[in-house]
Amino acid sequence: MFALRPILRIPAVSHCYVLAVVVAFFPNVSHAGFAALEAERNASGGLGAMNPPAIARSAEGDSLVVFNSFKSDQLHVFANRIAANVLPTNVASNLPSAVQVDTSTDRAYNPDVGMAADGRAVIVWNAATDSGLNAIRGRRYTSAGMPEAGEFEIDPLGATSKWTPTVALAPNGNFTVAWIGYDVSGSGPAAVYARRYAANGAPLSDAVKVSGSELAGRNLKECDIAMDAAGNYAIVYSSGDGSDLPGVEDRIHFQLFGPTGNKKNAQALGGFDGNDPAIAMQADGRFRLTWTGFYDATEKAAGNFAILARAFDQSGVPVTSRVRVNLYDYSMQFSPDIAMASNGDYVISWTTHYQDGSETAVYAKRYYKSSLAAGPEFQLNTLTIGYQDATAVAMDADGDIVTAWTTSASVPGKTTVATRRYRGDSNIGLGATLTSTRAQVKSGETITYSATISNLRTPQSPTGVSSIDVGIGAAPRARIVIDLSPKGSVTSAPKLNVPGICTQNAPQQYTCTLERPLRAGQKAQADFAIKALDTGNLDIKAAVAADSYDSNTADNSKLVTVVVK
């Protein structure tokens, strides 16, 4: 179960984790802003990785990826934080070093991560204890990525062994953990359990059994959890008929709960086989499910698994029919994941077999909140040697995407975790200004200038939750580029009036990058001094940019010409 490289990932393997992404061009659909921001990057550094990784993202785009790796011959959980603004000091092929999450000597595995809108995070995992039972532990992190305390026990061991935890957070930091529990006496079937916690880690409830009679005579397989802005949450899980064959008479179940854990609705999706479910929920409680199954009798006869999806309202009532996500339908598609923006736009990712000529590859597909596809499926991995699989995906409030998966192509002879970021369709207008008190100087004199970058997007509050809404229209990695003609030089590095970094790219060029995304309606300023070196015209240009879509770039640069006497 924990080998670094199974020959084929079969979707019937039990798990409780979140997975991956996609896009391209569809006629009559506006998605001009979508683009990859980078090629895939190594998120595990020199560490090997176990499958699968998990990833979560804040409203403004800070991300946390977690994975398993060996250290001193023991399996541990590691995490790597990817800031929304990847500053110039962090743009090497490897991201900043991953840090160990678990602190005990027990074997730690099956990690999952959830993140609140403001970036606070909770990581949960399985721990193999001396008693022979599997425990579930967790650890809380601040929005800056710092641990708030040591690891804690999710639920006393009691008479059950616990597996494959999954976690979701509300904007206020409260969180719920769900898992599969097995009766160690062997006298009872497995069940799905959940427990609620306050943002400070204090339990708000005991462990509660979620599943019931719907699992009678059936084998429990996987589970996942999602939460809306008010703290309502949904747990989805799958069950088999006992044959233990993937996709054979499997069923998808889900249950809805209020913020206090009160059960609101329960459903079993009938009509088609399915397993390996994942769930995502938008701010108002509407949600989407994706799972692995057979789309029709022909695919079932051929044994070709498809990635399926369906949309539901806040009460769990289907609002769309079941749809097939993947276009490529030869062989197996499996291990889907799903993520959702605050407005309901979403993305689904999965692993495919032989599609790009390699053993396995990872693909994704984006959808608008109406469930209209934003384009065809697209490939996440750029390296195609060996295998790429076990994807995870996360989305910020604006629909920007980050993905993670395991790969054998990055480091020879080793499985590692790759990540890749994409910008969404959100149109963010930027404006540049360049001001000085003087238009004419003498050679050898110094002039003071101010270059300003403005986010021209009007602030919006569609969810009414400030920690979510600040991410709507925010411009990640906003930057000002200052260029001079040869008749002038910057006397010292420009200074920003907000946290950030200014670096010299060329003798007469500087780039000032903001440390945090530039929110809608906000502006930032870089002050700098220029020395006039020779007589004639001295050109000073300020250009602004960000890792976001801007359909009107006419305001993105300003040129000022100073006459040097």
Image (spheres, rainbow, N blue to C red):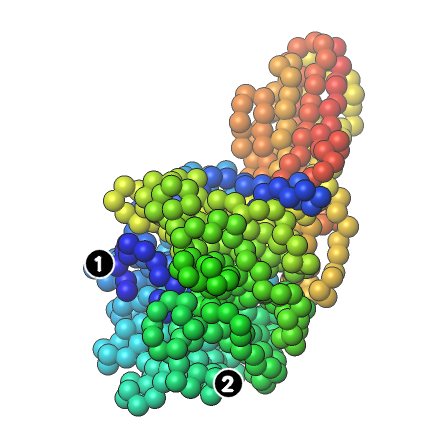
Q: Residue at x 60, y 57 (%)?
A: 346
Q: Are marks 1 and 2 in contact (CB under 8 Å)?
A: no
Task: Please identify the quarter of the rendering in which residue 489 is found.
Answer: top right
Q: Name the kind of residue labelled 2 in the image.
A: Ser
| Marker disc for residue 205 | 2
Label 2 crowding class (10 Å Cα cut-off): few <14, some 14-19, many 20+? some
Would residue 332 be visible to someone looking at this image? yes
In this rendering, the answer to whether 261 lies above or below 76 is below
Q: Residue at x 55, y 58 (%)?
A: 324
> Where's residue 303, x and y in %?
40, 60
Residue 28: quadrant of the picture: top right
Q: Who's the residue at 70% across and 9% down the image? A: 535
Q: Quadrant of the N terminus?
A: bottom left
Tell me the amino acid under the disc marked 1. Ser
Task: Judge from the rendering whether residue 60 lies leftward or rightward of residue 28; answer left or right.
Answer: left
Residue 72, numbered label: 1
- Say few, some or many: other residues with alpha carbon within 10 Å of mark 1 (under 14 / 14 to 19 / 20 or more): few
Which quarter of the rendering shows the C terminus?
Answer: top right
Which residue is located at x 56 percent, y 62 percent?
Answer: 309
